[in-house]
C-alpha cells in the first residue's frame, strides 16, 4: 500500500495483520460501498461501519481570502487518484483494530443510479479507479442500483432517504449507522451513506446464501435481477 493515508473521520488503517483462514462453514465477508467524493459509506459484514472522504473535492474553484484560486488539472487528478487508492486500501485492509480478513465480495452502488443531476466526472473517475483496482487484484465486485438497495431495505424501490435509514436501523441494529464527528466519535444523528452501505452489504450476504436477517418476500425481490460475479457461487448456511 503505497499511498500515505491522512487522518480522517475513519480510524487510520493499521499494518495488515495475519489473514484469518475461513472454511465454507464460516459466513462470507462482504463489504458494502456507497461511493462519494466527500462521504463514502462503508459497511463490513462483521458489523463495522464508517464514512470516508475528502473535503474540497467537489469544486474546481475555491476562494482564498477574497482571491479566486483555480486548482490545476494535475493537482485535481492527483487528489482524486489519492482518494481512490485510500478507498481501495480501506475496503481491502479494513479500519485499524479489526482482523485482516479479505472480502469474498464487494457490493457497490452503481454509477448509473445517480440522480437527475447526472454523474460528475470526478466521482466517475474515482468509482472506476476503485473498481478497476479491486477487480485487477482479484476481488469480485457487484454493482447494484440505488433503487435495488431501497427495495431490499424498505420494500419499495422509490423510498426516500429517511425511510431507508429508519428501516436499516430497525432491521440491521448490529450495524451502527450514526454519523461520525470530527474527532471520530459517534453522534446522535444517522448517516444515510452508512445506511446504504449496510444495505448493499446485506444484499451481498443474501446472494451468497448467508442472509443477515430474514426479510419479507417483497424486499427480496431486489435480488431477482442481480447476478453474482463470474467465479463466485452461493454457499448456503
Image: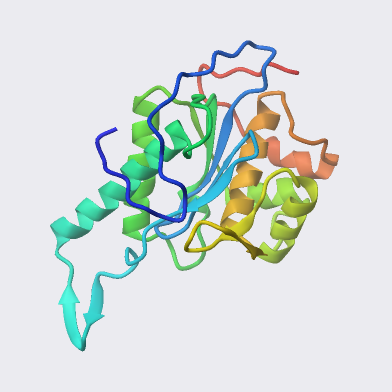
Q: Is residue 88 left or right of residue 212?
A: left
* Depth order, front residue of 155/167: 167
The quarter of the image holding the C terminus is top right
Q: Which quadrant would residue 213 be assigned to in this image?
A: top right
Identify the residue shown where x is 39% and y is 46%.
127
Identify the residue shown where x is 26% and y is 40%.
3
* Depth order, front residue of 230/167: 167
* Depth order, front residue of 106/9: 9
Q: Which quadrant would residue 22 be assigned to in this image?
A: top right
Q: Report x, y in % for residue 54.
A: 37, 59
Q: Report x, y in % for residue 83.
A: 33, 49
Q: Is residue 64 above or below residue 227?
A: below
The quarter of the image holding the N terminus is top left
Q: Is residue 71 above or below residue 200?
A: below
Q: Is residue 167 left or right of residue 105?
A: right
Coloring applied to the structure: rainbow
Identify the residue shown where x is 66% and y is 63%.
161
> Which residue is farthest top?
23
Q: Report x, y in % for residue 211.
A: 74, 31
Q: Is residue 61 left or right of residue 120?
A: left
Amino acid at each position: 500500500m503505497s499511498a500515505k493515508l491522512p487522518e480522517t473521520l475513519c480510524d487510520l488503517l493499521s499494518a495488515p495483520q495475519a489473514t484469518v483462514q475461513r472454511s465454507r462453514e464460516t459466513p462470507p465477508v462482504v463489504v458494502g460501498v456507497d461511493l462519494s467524493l466527500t462521504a463514502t459509506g462503508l459497511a463490513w459484514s462483521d458489523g463495522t461501519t464508517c464514512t470516508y472522504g475528502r473535503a474540497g473535492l467537489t469544486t474546481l474553484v475555491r476562494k482564498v481570502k477574497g482571491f479566486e484560486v483555480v486548482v490545476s488539472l494535475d493537482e485535481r487528478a492527483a487528489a482524486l487518484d489519492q482518494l481512490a487508492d485510500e478507498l481501495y486500501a480501506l475496503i481491502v485492509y479494513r479500519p485499524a483494530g479489526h482482523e485482516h480478513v479479505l472480502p469474498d465480495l464487494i457490493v457497490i452502488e452503481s454509477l448509473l443510479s445517480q440522480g437527475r443531476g447526472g454523474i460528475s466526472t470526478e466521482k466517475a473517475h474515482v468509482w472506476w479507479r476503485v473498481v478497476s483496482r479491486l477487480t485487477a487484484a482479484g476481488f469480485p465486485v457487484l454493482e447494484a442500483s440505488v433503487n435495488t438497495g431501497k427495495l431490499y431495505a424498505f420494500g419499495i424501490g422509490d423510498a426516500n432517504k429517511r425511510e431507508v435509514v429508519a428501516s436499516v436501523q430497525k432491521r440491521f441494529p448490529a450495524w451502527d449507522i450514526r454519523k461520525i464527528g470530527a474527532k471520530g466519535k459517534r453522534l446522535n444523528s444517522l448517516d444515510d451513506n452508512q445506511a446504504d452501505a449496510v444495505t448493499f452489504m446485506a444484499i451481498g450476504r443474501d446472494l451468497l446464501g448467508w442472509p443477515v436477517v430474514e426479510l419479507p418476500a417483497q424486499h427480496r425481490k431486489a435480488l431477482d435481477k442481480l447476478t453474482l460475479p463470474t467465479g463466485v457461487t452461493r454457499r448456503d448456511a
